[in-house]
Amino acid sequence: MIEPRDPLLSVEALVTGYGNKQVLNSISVQVAPGEIVALIGHNGAGKSTLLKAIFGLLPIWQGKISFQGKVLRSAHPSQLRRQGVVYVPQGSRVFADFTVGENLEMGGLIISNQMRIQEGIERVLTLFPSLKSRWYQKAATLSGGEKQMLALATALILSPRLLLLDEPSLGLAPRILSQAFALIQQINADLNVAVLIVEQKVREVLKIAHYVYVLRNGRVSSSGTPARFDDTKLWQVYL
Ligand SMILES: Nc1ncnc2c1ncn2[C@@H]1O[C@H](COP(=O)(O)OP(=O)(O)O)[C@@H](O)[C@H]1O
Ligand SMILES: [Mg+2]
């Protein structure tokens, strides 16, 4: 018997695209509270498009997206951030001309309570101690891995319930890859935040995911627990 998973995020038969070009074709994806869910699939399959649609950056043509049981209608990113959804786009975007400290403070901008911003910053500095010593350093001078860390840390200031990560491993040196995935696993466990993660590094992401969706041409071609795809490399069949 398959246990029904009580979803934090539920995407049902979603259709969307850009202009008049349809990209997602009736996609359904669920994320349970505290779960790490991986989205894998070839370039152009629609993975980033799905994350953008969930974060309210694209219009919903058909289907629906619910968060914590409430349907998100024409949701705006700032509303979603208030409700506990944060999005870290592909390419570890940080404000290059600002210092590490300023970037972190901007992560808390939508919180009006200064105490809560301070608490958020202290919490993420415990997770990312190396950012503490770089507080006054311009973000432009950080390495790729450090920028990715800063982008993640900034997203976590708001104590999100759901973290949307688009290829966090992109551009990281091979030697720090496993560290990056371990960190995502630690964030998930320590902060009890659910993670919907898009990754090309399939082997690594299968190690930390609780559930996997394979996307192909804007559709879910397969889904299941990582064990289902793991050693047999079955996922390759669905790509
Ligand atoms: N801003 C955009 N405008 C028009 N088409 C886009 C845009 N971004 C992505 N696409 C198209 O949508 C499809 C899915 O892209 P994307 O979601 O980025 O794929 P993935 O993240 O899986 O590599 C591709 O055909 C891509 O060319
Ligand atoms: Mg992408």
Image (tube, rainbow, N blue to C red):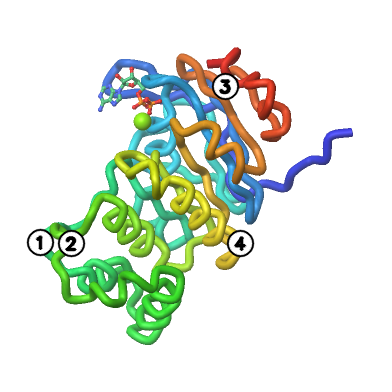
Mark 1 residue type: Asp
Q: Residue at x 30, y 40 (%)?
A: 171
Does the beta carbon of the residue at mark 4 sit less than 8 Å from ligand 2? no
In the rendered view, would you say 214 is above or below 139?
Answer: above
- Spatial CA distance of label 4 from label 1 is 32 Å
The residue singled out by tag 3 in the image is: 220
Circle 1 SS class: loop
- Spatial CA distance of label 1 from label 3 is 40 Å
The residue singled out by tag 1 in the image is: 97
Q: How many marks?
A: 4
Question: Earlier along the polypeptide chain: callout 1 or callout 3?
Answer: 1
Question: Earlier along the polypeptide chain: callout 4 or callout 3?
Answer: 4
The residue singled out by tag 4 in the image is: 189
Q: Nearer the viewer, residue 106 or 64?
A: 106
> Residues at badges 2 and 1 in contact (C-beta under 8 Å)?
yes
The residue singled out by tag 2 in the image is: 139
Could you say where residue 128 lies in the image, as x and y percent from the top left?
40, 68
Does the beta carbon of the residue at mark 3 sit less than 8 Å from ligand 1? no
Mark 3 residue type: Val
Q: Residue at x 53, y 39 (%)?
A: 204
Question: Earlier along the polypeptide chain: callout 4 or callout 1?
Answer: 1
Residue positioned most to the right: 1
Question: Earlier along the polypeptide chain: callout 2 or callout 1?
Answer: 1
Which of pointers 3 and 2 indicates the residue nearer the eye? 2
